[in-house]
Each structure stands twice: as C-alpha cells, then as structure tokens.
Image: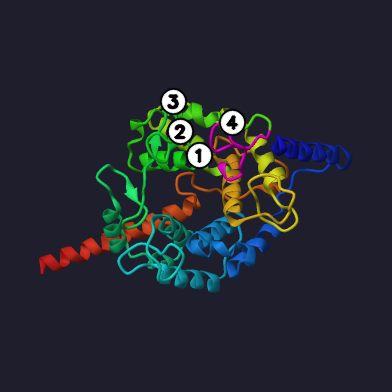
Amino acid sequence: IKCEESVEKIYKDFLSYQHREQGSITLYREHHVRYLLKALRSLPQVQQSLDASRPWLIYWIIQSLYLLNEKLSDAYVNEICDFLQRCQNPEGGFGVGGPGQIPHLAPTYAAVNALCILQSDRAYDVINREKLASWLRELRSSNGSFSLHIDGESDIRCQTYEGGFGAVPGCEAHGGYTFCGYATLLLLQRENLCDKDNLLRWTVNRQMEFEGGFQGRTNKLVDGCYSFWVGALFPLLDAAERKLEHTIVRDERMFDSVAAQEYVLLCSQSNLSGGFTDRPKANSHSSDLYHTCYCLSGLSLFQHSFNKNIICGNIENAVCETHPLFNIGPECAYDAMQHYKQLDASSSNQNESVNDN
C-alpha cells in the first residue's frame, strides 16, 4: 500500500504541474552522467560493501554511460582495461571482487560485457579466451547446471508452472532467472525446449496495472530493475517467433510502453543527485549503480525494440539502443564477434601454413 501511495502522489503531482506549467517528463541526463563518472573514480562509504562487486560496478557504470551517449576518454578506457586485466585469473575467469580473488561466473560475465562495450583491440585482448573456455568447462555439472565457481553452488534456470524460470527445480519464477534462462536457450538455439506461450503469459502479467512498471515475481512490489530483466523478454520472444515466420509480439501492444517509461522517469529517477532506484524513496540520494544500469537499459528497450520508436516526453529523452540478449550496444556485440571471428580465421590460416610447410 505504501508503495502504491508513493507512486500515486508522484503521478498526481506531475499531472498537476503539467497542467499548470505545461511541463513534460524529463530524463536528467547531465545529472546521471555526473553521478556515474564520480562513481567510476570512487564510491561513497555507505556503498563500501560493493567492493566485492568491482567488475559489476564497471559494467553497470559504462553500460549506463553508453546508453546516455557519453563517450569515455582514452585514459578511462586504458585504466578500465588495466584493472580488469588484473582481475583476470591466470587459469581463466575474473575475480569476484577484484585482483587476486577467485574467479566467479557472475563478475566474469560483467567483465566480458564491459570490455566489449569499450570496442577497442586493447579491451578485446584482455580476455584470455582459451583459459576462459577451459575454466567454464570445469564449472559444468552432470545435470547441465553450472557452478558459480569451483566447488561453489549450482545455479539452474528451471521453467515453472507459471511460465517463468526459477533458480532450481521447485522454486518460484523470477524475472532475473527467467531472462537468464530464456537468453541461454536462445544462445543455444534451443528455445523450442520451453513453453513459450506460457512464458509470454507470465511475462505480460509482470507489468503492474497501477504503477506501470514491472515486478519480478507474482505478488511482489514493482522494481525499476525489472524494466530490463522482464522488459527484454518481449523482443527476445518476438525474435524467436519471427524465426518461425509468424509472430506473437510484433509491436508494443503486448505491454504499455508509455506507462513503463513513465514509471522509470517519474518514480525511479533521482532528479537531484542523479541515478535511479527500485521504487520511490523518501531519501532522494538512494540511487544505486545497479538500478541505474537496468532502469536505463529497460528505458532503451521501451523506446526502441519494436516497429517504431516510442519516446515518452521530449525527444531529448531518447537513449541509445541496447541489445536485448547481451545488454550492450548492438554494434558493441557485433564488433566483438567480428574481432574474434577474424582472430580465429587468422589463427587457422597460420596453422594451415605451418602444416603445409
């Protein structure tokens, strides 16, 4: 009830202001850029616990800056590459909190994404793909799941009766697990193995009727981060269906794009200190880097994923596109794949020359 009351007050205040001042919803781009660049250098004391998530912090920050069309200087790019290189374990994978720590799947995902966003040979060369592949094979269990680290807990994405995916068999469906599970099936080209109709039904029902944003689980509160985790499922389901030459999600009508954008910009956005949060808070300085990244990523999907762009408020509110499968820029994903494809081709040609000799 308190959450709904907070959202209701924000919407009423905005409508009253809009009526009096002809105001419009605004993305406070400069506030967010300042907030992110400051965080790239140092974190406030209240967030010191995030020291154990440093590769994640880099990814959240530079993905957010990318979406805001803020270019990083060469100095920043080199510093990020140097730091992530120190985080990489000699036997493969990236450390959970920073240099010298055990490699862990989650920060490895974040580090690889961050390096791809930088779009430079220097960044691509950081990743030791041979060691990374060997380490990933060590993490695979006989039941198909992967441990997060050597001798660590397993993490399975299992579709439930609701249609979404849970962490392990019998657990309730969750927005983050559902995205990871379905994205994995798409990467493996095995999306036909899940019940897509039931998945779509579950996904559609995650948009909150009153707030306009998305929840991550049935009967839970709205949360800005699910703008991406749940919002990305719509274009992914659409892409899978178009491969079969018929579609179930051709445009924005499967969810209310405008209402979703209004929630992000009015209820999750901090117009004072910059950044985004999960839901309206009494403390205007409660933004965090995680929600900033996934609110902006969701905003990008709401604006660009379908047949026509839908920008809530002024055109200046438009952010750059993100790839719904990788959550980095489409050209970032393409350039990285092309780089490694050319690298493999060059290596193959060299091996053939050696064998011929």
- How crowded is the residue under tag 4: few (<14 C-alpha within 10 Å), some, or many (20+)? some
Which one is earlier in the sequence, the residue at label 2 or at label 3? 2
* Tally of numbered tags: 4
Marks 2 and 3, Cα distance to the nearest angstrom?
A: 11 Å
Q: Quadrant of the N terminus?
A: top right
**Mark identifier at residue 197:** 3
**Quarter residue 312 falls in:** top right
Q: Are marks 4 and 1 in contact (CB under 8 Å)?
A: no
- How crowded is the residue under tag 3: few (<14 C-alpha within 10 Å), some, or many (20+)? few
Residue at the spot of label 1 = 175
User: Where is residue 127 drawn, in percent x and y?
Assistant: 37, 64
User: Where is residue 95 drawn, in percent x and y?
Assistant: 41, 64
- How crowded is the residue under tag 2: few (<14 C-alpha within 10 Å), some, or many (20+)? many
User: Where is residue 348 drawn, in percent x and y?
Assistant: 22, 61
Local secondary structure at mark 1: helix
Q: Are marks 4 and 2 in contact (CB under 8 Å)?
A: no
Task: Decide: is 340 above or below 188.
Answer: below
Q: Is residue 107 magenta?
A: no
